[in-house]
Amino acid sequence: MSRTCNFAKLVGQKRSILRCSLFLAIVFLMPFTLMHAQSTLTTGTPYNIVNENSGSCVDDTASGTANGTAVQQWACGEGTYSTQPNQQWEFENGTASGYYYVANVNAPAETWNVTGNGTTSGSLIQTWTYAGASNEEWEAVSLGNGYYKFVGQGSGLCLDTPSASTANGVQLQIYTCNGTAAQAFKLITPSSGTGTGTGTATNIFAPFEYVGDLGDANQIPGIVSASGAKAVILAFLDPDNNGCSLIWPGANGPLPNDTVGSTSMGTAIADLQAAGVTVALSQGGAGGQEAAAYCGTAAETQAVYQSLITKYHVNWLDFDVEYPETSGQSVRRAQALAALQAANPGLIVSYTLPLGPGGLDSGTGGGFTDITDAKAAGLNLNIVNGMAMDFGGTNENQPQLSEEGAAALKSQIQSAGLTSTVGLTFLPGTSDDTPPNYFTLANATTMLDWAEANNYVTLLSFWELNRDNGGCPGSTVDEDTCSGVSQSNYEFSSIFKQF
């Protein structure tokens, strides 16, 4: 049956005329609709640009600020999105109508640029100071479901992940548009992970894992995966030989060396990030220091901290301060971190500090001094994480003492003039007290319920993933490889990961 509209035969047939008129309107207007399928992007708004095929973010390599920096793909900092400035991009109106240039938040003068003004498939993408040239401008064409392809003005080719690679560090290119997922990118809001607009208000479970208890860095991804945790705090980076540098436990030298056993920490961390795990790096610990202890100035300290962000693509640094501090250390740390946050918008900073039922130690050099120094330096201290463990005494009610300590900590944060949220880190199983106390699975459930009822608590953690098993029930000492209570593997994790 013919679908042709013959108006001569349709005189007086109003319904048929209406259908044919609508049909012709669609036919004639379709080219104009498709031509504007891109939708207008919001300029000046930071976005993550996430590839459909790999799930990785478009990334300014090593937070580069110079012309010629490779534009690559790398696992997003928070797994499905990223608050790292070098993985955030802003669209601005180009010189050609309907085209944008794409600037990096970490280096706003640097924009996507086709190397050598290339117009052929395989030409690589770098950053370069924007000059309004056709190799720097892109059309964003909507593909539906929040995805776009980006078509170069000068080449007519699409932004592309070579060979549909899913690996970190692959430099992007232009290539003949082919409709594949390697050329489809979603715009994600960095603060929330929502599609097509920082902070730590979202609850998170992030247990510690002490690298020094492992023989090889290649064990880390498997441990974290088995636990089900979506975030982990890797510990501890400490100064090498009391110098202004950092070293991983078991590594063959200070950074940039980071091989532990057969595997680099960089590889282990990248594997975690590729699996959607948020990685925090912690310095210090009960027997160690952090960089500010031995760096002479805040600027030198900041450079060491920055090296971690650049090398490992993380946006969360933790400072576990238990060791007696050197002269001026707390102030140097705070000043360095305030400057570091200014240079890395969205950087999360947490202090992990000893906690008693009355809160932080308010004496000279205690935890309260650390947070007041943070305020004085202008640091946005996101989380103050109290170590709710080793309270002393016999048969202590550990949940009650933890709750009292958290409430006191909240008051101390407010009195210091900070807006930090509270974290709590527990020691599952056997404590270090003599005689020992035991933090049980029932205690964990109690603290989970309490934390969920008190919205000033945003972080739950414990020491450490490597101990979350029942390999030594009844132990009267704090073991490195088991909890000391009867439990299944990762049973504490299964409770806390509900947070």
Image (tube, grey):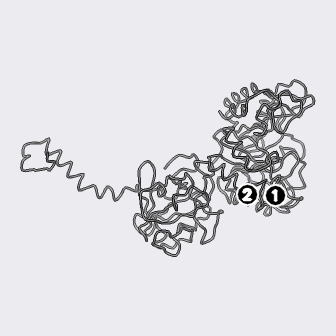
What's the residue type where badge 2 is placed?
Leu
Front residue (pair 274, 428):
274
Front residue (pair 264, 105):
264
Q: Is residue 367 above or below residue 347?
A: above
| View extreme (bottom): residue | 116
The answer to which image quadrant residue 401 occupies is top right
Which residue corresponds to mark 2?
Answer: 308
- The answer to whether residue 127 shows anywhere in this view is yes
Describe the element under mark 2 as helix, strand or loop.
Answer: helix
Which residue corresponds to mark 1?
Answer: 246
Q: What percent of the width, then of the height, locates residue 487?
A: 76, 28
Viewport quadrant of the C terminus: top right
Describe the element under mark 1 as helix, strand or loop.
Answer: strand
Left or right of 448? Residue 6 is left
Q: What percent of the width, then of the height, locates residue 353?
A: 82, 42
Q: What percent of the width, then of the height, locates residue 8?
A: 6, 50
What's the residue type where badge 1 is placed?
Leu
Around disc 2, counting alpha carbons within 10 Å, would you say few (fewer than 14), some (14 to 19), or many (20 or more)? some
Left or right of 402? Residue 3 is left
Nearer-N-terminus badge (1/2): 1
Q: Give the numbered dot on residue 448.
A: none
Around disc 1, counting alpha carbons within 10 Å, would you say few (fewer than 14), some (14 to 19), or many (20 or more)? many
The residue located at (7%, 46%) in the rendering is 11
| View extreme (right): residue | 434
Viewport quadrant of the N terminus: top left
Q: What percent of the width, then of the height, locates residue 299?
A: 78, 63
Kindly report the distance in space between the C-alpha atoms of the residues bearing marks 1 and 2: 9 Å
